[in-house]
Structures are given as structure tokens and as C-alpha cells.
Image: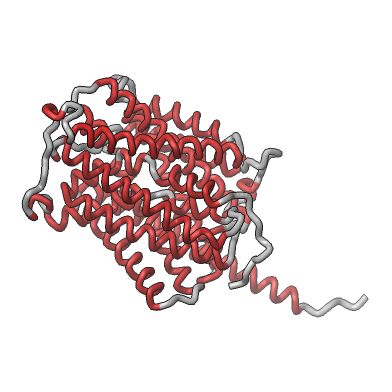
Amino acid sequence: MSKESAHKGSLSWWQLALLGFGCITGTGFFLGSGIAIERSGFSVLLVFLLAAIGTYFVFDALANMIAQDTQKGSFCTYSKKAFGHWAGFSHGWIYWTAEMLILGSQLTALGLFTRFWLPHTPLWVFTAAYAALGIGVVLLGTKGFEKAENILAVVKIAAIVMFIILAFLVFTGVLGEHNAHMHKPTQMNHFLSHGITGLWSGLIYVFFAFAGIEVMGLMAAKLHDPKEAPKIGKVVLSVITALFILSIGLALLLAPLEDFTSEESPFVIALRDLNFTVIVHIFNGVLIIAGFSSLVASLYSVTQMMYMIAKDGDAPKIFTKISKRKIPYGSLGLTICGMIVSIVIALLLPKEVYEYITTAGGLMLLYAWLFMVSASRKLLKLSAWGHLKTITAMILVLLAASGTLFDKTSRLGFYVSLLFLVIIGVVTLIMKRKWKKAETDQDQGLWRPLKKQ
């Protein structure tokens, strides 16, 4: 790989760390972890540890490629360098599809959080309102996005820390201990109450809780020193993993397992039994802020990714249109169209939509992660430890994907993701023929003899 030593970005290490906290801690954790608890029970804590290891190994592979050869196109460019044009093309479109599905998931989650206060309002009303607000933030440009995410990242971390403090106050008897259920697994069969298949099927939803590392990867290309990317990733993911496991563990001790559902945040469920109504309402408001932050991050990343795909000639040129404030309004228009589809789906399937979209979007994102890891194996000179990390990451990702087959709801999401893969695969084959023909015509043009004057 060629080294771009002249690269000089605008982000400091702490700014990227804040962006990492903001992009990763979103609705996948604050709501999606409820589905993981439904599937895995107390063993969800082990699932979080496994997913954290896999996520770190994926980001480490991406960060080391960024450190060695910083590219504006980030991970799609690395796939293209490693395996050819077809890989960059398909990787870009797989990631774009994943983010569009995740946007739908985030909009639905925000709607569900808000229905805590207005239970009789149709879900699509909330999804439309949050979509409009998110677009407004993206229209502020890159600097506006970074400032908003930095502020919201602090709010999200504060929310998790606040929950942890409240739980400890309950356990020490300072707050409402008599109202808490205080469930504790005392035997191994209690810990694995849902069996190995339950643990396995919950893995996809926990991986989804770590979604956002690729956005952090996109922004890492703007670091003052891209070589700091691997170290920053290690710090961010270590802190987030500790907070995730501690807060989920405390939530499991505060409420019975059967109370956790996909339609309400596990943290709101855990606090509700304490009969501190004001605290529950405040925390629900914080969850909405946190979810909105991850929505904005996804909006920004998917819009930027489509702009990059179009600049590489792998999407219509209209998506390269950019405003005076450097906002890619062409690709943003496509993102808006995708969100409208998500709102319509929320209108048609208000009960099942979150799990379906979360599974399909999470799987498409994991397929994109597989591309990243595979590219690093081709482009980097890996040590024995490096090979072990990438192989472990791929195994964990494949386990998460296969785990969806054990549950009826997530199985449908798996089939939806396969459908998208087939469509992208067919389009890639068609494009390969076009690229080959274009190369042939170009070669013939280069060697065509000049006409006599």
C-alpha cells in the first residue's frame, strides 16, 4: 500500500473519541439490547463481551489500514485496492443498504421511546418528525455535525453513568430497595436459562449495539495523525464495553427477565419498578436525545458514503452534486427517499418492524464488516497475533449471522438481508461486464493507429 505522509486532518484524538462515543452508543444499545435480553437472558452479559471482542478486532483492522494508508473513501477504497473494482462497488452498496435499514430501525426506536409519553399517537408521526430534525442537523454541514455529536455524546455517556449510579443507590438501600426485584442467577442453568441457542441468537442484536464503528472509521481519516486511530479505537471500545456490561447487568438485577421486551428500553423497565416517576421520565428524555444522536450519525455517514460511491463512478453522477456549504445534496436526496420508505413501513408494520429492520440492517452491516477484515488480511502485513484477531472477528461475525436462524422473527430479517445481497451481487456482475467492455474499448483506443494527415 502507498503511504500518504502528506495527509493532515483537522480532528484531534479527543474529538474522534467523542465522536466514537456519540456514534456507537445509540438506539442499538438503548432499545436493541432489550431484544438481546429476551433471546439470551442473563447470558447476554457474555454475549456483550464476545461482541465487544469481535467489534474491536474489526475496528482494529480498519484503523490499521487507515494508519498505514489514509483514504477519503475509507473502507470501500481498501476493498477496491485489495480485491478489485467489484469489491469496492459491492462493499459500498452493502454498507449503504445497511445504513438505510438502520436508519429505519433508529426512527422506529425513537418513535417507541416517544410513545412512552403519547401512547395513542401513530408511530409514523414520530418517525417523520425525527427524520425532518435529523436532516436539519445534517444540513448544518460537517462542522455542525461534529459539534452536535460531541455534545450529544456527553449526554449519552452521562445517561448510562446516571443509570449505574441510581442502581447502586438502590442496592445500598438509599433509594427504594423495597420496590426492586433484585433478581440474581445462582446456578449455571439460571445463567443459561435460554440455552446455548438463546445465547447464539442474541449475538446479532448485541453486535448491533456496537454499530457506529464504521462512522468512526470514516472520521478517522480526518485525524491530525491517522496513526493514532488504533489506539483511540482501543480506548473508546474498552470504555463503552465496560459501561454496556455494567449497566445491562444492573438492569437485569432490577427487573424480572420476563418484563424485558423489544418495545421499551430495558433501562426504563428497570427503573419503572422503583416508582420514581420523575426519574423514569427524565431518563426516557435522555434516551430520545441519545437515539437522535445515533440517527444523525447514520444520516451523515450514509450520505457521505453515497457521495463517495458516486465520485468513484459507481453510482449516478447526480449524487455527486454538492452545495456551497459542501453538503452533498444529491446523495442526501436519496437518503431522504430511503427514510420515507422507512416511515411507510413503520405505518404498515408498527408492531413487528423494529425487530425485522434491526435484524436485516444489523446483518448487512456485519457483511460490510467482513469486507473490512478481509481487505486488511490482503493489504496489511499481519503478525501471527494479527491473523488470529482477524480470523476471530470473522468467526464471531459469522456466528452472529447464523444465530438469526434460531428465531422466527430474526430468521425473516436474515432472508431479507440475503435478498439484498443477491440484488447487489447481480448488479455487480452486470457492472463487471460494463467495466470490462470499457477497459477493452479504452485499450483498443490507445492502440488504434493514427490517421494520415
- Name the residue at 14% across, 40% down: 257
Q: In front here: 29 or 280? A: 280
* Residue 314 visible here: no
- Name the residue at 50% across, 55% down: 217
- Name the residue at 42% across, 58% down: 234
* Residue 347 visible here: yes
Q: In front here: 310 or 398? A: 398
Q: Position of residue 256 (x, y in %)?
A: 13, 37
Q: In front here: 317 or 70? A: 70
| Residue at the extreme right | 453
Q: Which quadrant: the C terminus? A: bottom right
Residue 126 position by quadrant: top left
- Name the residue at 39% across, 39% down: 157
**How many numbered dots are placed on residues in this image?**
0
Left or right: where 320 falls relative to 186: right
Left or right: where 371 falls relative to 53: right
Q: Position of residue 390 (x, y in %)?
A: 38, 69
Q: Position of residue 155 (x, y in %)?
A: 42, 34
Q: Which quadrant: the N terminus? A: bottom right
Q: In front here: 353 or 427? A: 353
Q: Position of residue 102 (x, y in %)?
A: 40, 44
Q: How is the image coloured?
A: secondary structure
